[in-house]
Image: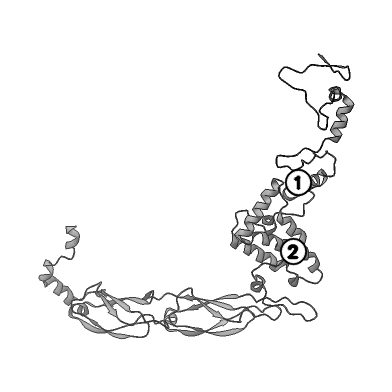
Amino acid sequence: MSVDSASRKIRPAPLPGTRWRRAAGMPARSTGWRFWCRTCRAQRRRRRPMPRSRRGRPRRPLPSSTGSTTRPILNQFVSRWRLFFGFHLGGEAGAVRDPYEILGLARDAGNTEVKAAYRRLAKRLHPDAQSEGNAARQQSRFQEVTAAYNQLKDEAARRRFEAERRAAAGAARAPVFEETMRRGAAEPAPSEDIFSELFEGIRSAGKRVFRARGSDRGYRLSVSFLEAANGVRKRVRLDGGKTLEVNVPAGIDDGQQIRLRGQGDEGHGGADAGDALVSVAVEPHPCFRREGRDIHLALPVSLPEAVLGARIDAPTVSGPVSLTIPAGANTGTRLRLKGRGIAVEGGAPGDQYVTLEVVLPKVPDEALRDFAATWTAGAKHNPRKDFSES
C-alpha cells in the first residue's frame, strides 16, 4: 500500500514491473484517486473520443436490435424468404409459378420442346384468337405464358433463371422471374417473330379478325402398274361431291403423293385454303416387277427356241419390242433391253432385264419322246455335276 501525499488517501500499490496508467486528458501531476473514482470514470468515458480503426476511420457503433439501422435489413431478409416459400411452396407469393409448370414441360426439355409448347399455348390463348367476352379472361393467362417463355427461350435465359432460382433458395436475391411475372404486360415480346408462323395477319374491320390457313385433306387413288409407269389422268372425288381430274405423272411409285393446292379446307378470316394430298397406290403386275427405274420380266421360251435360237416379241411397259434369243439359251439366261425401263421426268430411263425360262409342252408328243430316247449325247451330260462334287 502507498499513501498519496496530496489527498492523504490510501491506494493500492502497483504490481511489480508495472506503472500507474493515466487516463486520457488526465494531467501528469494528477492524483491517483481520480483514476479509481467511479464518477470520474464515467466522465472520462463520455469525453473519450470515438475509437479508430487500423485505417484511421471511425468505427461505427453496433446497432441495437430494434434500431432503425437493422429494420431495412430485417425487412429485406423477411421479404426474400417469403418470396422463396411462395415460389417453391405456393405461399403468399403463389402467383409466381414455375415456368416449366406453366408451359407443361419437364425440367430436361430442350429449346425445340419449349418453342413448340409456347406456340401451342400462344395460338390458343392469343387475344386476337378469342371472342370479345373471353379475351379479357385469357389476357392474364397469355401474359403468364409469355413471361414463362422469356425465361426458357434459350440457353442463356435458362441459365439466368436457374441462377435466380438457386439464389432465391439461399435467400441471396429475389428471382428475376418474379419481377417478370409482376410486370406482366410490360414484358417485351419474344425476340423471334414467332407469331408470324402462327398468324398470317390481323386486320381490323370494326373488330379484330383471326386469320388461319385451312387444313389439308388426304385422299387415296389406285392406278395400275402400266398407268403408273407411263402416266395417266384420273378423276378424284373430293369431300362435298366435288370431282377433280388429277394428272398422274409417268414413273410415279407406290405411296407417293400428289398435291392439289387450294383444294383442302377453307381458311379463316380470308386466309388461304388448305391443300388436297392424293396418295397413289400402284397395283402389282402379274409379269413385270419394278426395282427403282429398272423393270424385271421372266419370259418363257420353247425348247426349239432355246436350242436353235430365235427372234421373238418381248413385252415392255411401253409396248412389245423384238428380242433375239441366242442359240443354246437355257433357263436363267438374262438379256438386257436398254432404255426400256421407267422413264422419270428430268432423268435417264431405266432398263428392262429379261430372264428366260425354257418350258416343255405339258403333254410331250411321240417324236420328242423318241428323240430323247435315242439321243446318246444326252446320256453323257450331267446337269447335277456341280451338286455331286460339292
Q: Which residue is mark 1?
A: 81
Q: Name the residue located 76 percent from the left edge and 65 percent from the top edge.
A: 186
**Quadrant location of residue 329?**
bottom left
Q: Where residue 170 sits: x, y (%)?
A: 69, 45
- The mark total stands at 2
Q: Where residue 277 sits: x, y (%)?
A: 56, 77
Q: Residue furthest left?
A: 376
Spatial distance from mark 2 to mark 1, Cα to Cα? Answer: 26 Å
Work out which quarter of the rendered image holds the N terminus and state it: top right
Judged left or right of residue 5, residue 80 is left
- In the foreground, 3 or 157: 3
Q: Where residue 342 sits: x, y (%)?
A: 38, 80
- SS for callout 1: helix
Q: Where residue 226 sits: x, y (%)?
A: 42, 81
Work out which quarter of the rendered image holds the C terminus and state it: bottom left
Q: Is residue 102 above or below residue 336?
A: above
Specify the amino acid type for callout 1: Trp
Q: Which residue is mark 2?
A: 143
Q: Name the residue located 80 percent from the left edge and 44 percent from the top edge.
A: 74
